[in-house]
Image: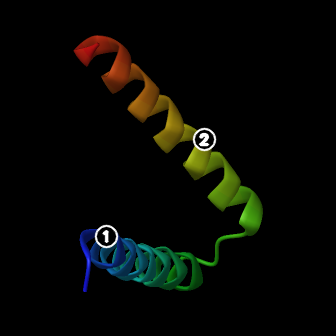
Amino acid sequence: MDARNLDSVSREEQKAILSNTISRCMIENHMTLENLDEACESVREIYRKNATIKG
């Protein structure tokens, strides 16, 4: 298996872990897709700020 294929598998596994965690949280807390969109925007902003600080 080449490095590109291993990276692809790792990304798929990470995506599955994150998706399962988010889905579980949303179901347990009776959240909507609007809540998810707002949370994603907050996470994006945190990543942007961190990139700016480190850059």
Depth order, front residue of 52/29? 52
- Count residues near mark 1 (Cα–Cα under 10 Å), then give few for <14, some for 14-19, many for 20+: few
Name the residue: 25% across, 70% down. 3
Query: In the visual, does 15 lie left or right of 32?
Result: left
Which image quadrant for residue 2? bottom left
Mark number, residue 7 = 1
Q: Do the residues labelled 1 and 2 touch (CB within 8 Å)?
A: no
The percent position of residue 24, horizontal first and vertical second, equals 48, 85
- Count residues near mark 2 (Cα–Cα under 10 Å), then give few for <14, some for 14-19, many for 20+: few
Q: Say which residue label 2 marks.
A: 41
Q: For numbered disc 1, what is the local secondary structure?
A: helix
Q: Which residue lies furthest to the front in this view?
A: 2
Q: For numbered disc 2, what is the local secondary structure?
A: helix
Considering only vertical position in the picture, is 41 above or below 34? above
Name the residue: 72% across, 69% down. 32
The percent position of residue 34, horizontal first and vertical second, equals 76, 58
N-term-proximal mark, 1 vs 2:
1
Depth order, front residue of 6/16? 6
Quadrant for the C terminus in the image? top left
Which image quadrant for residue 16? bottom left
The percent position of residue 30, horizontal first and vertical second, equals 63, 78
Considering only vertical position in the picture, is 46 above or below 2? above
Question: CA–CA distance between discs 1 and 2?
Answer: 26 Å
Going by the numbered disc 2, the residue's amino acid type is: Glu
The percent position of residue 41, horizontal first and vertical second, equals 60, 41
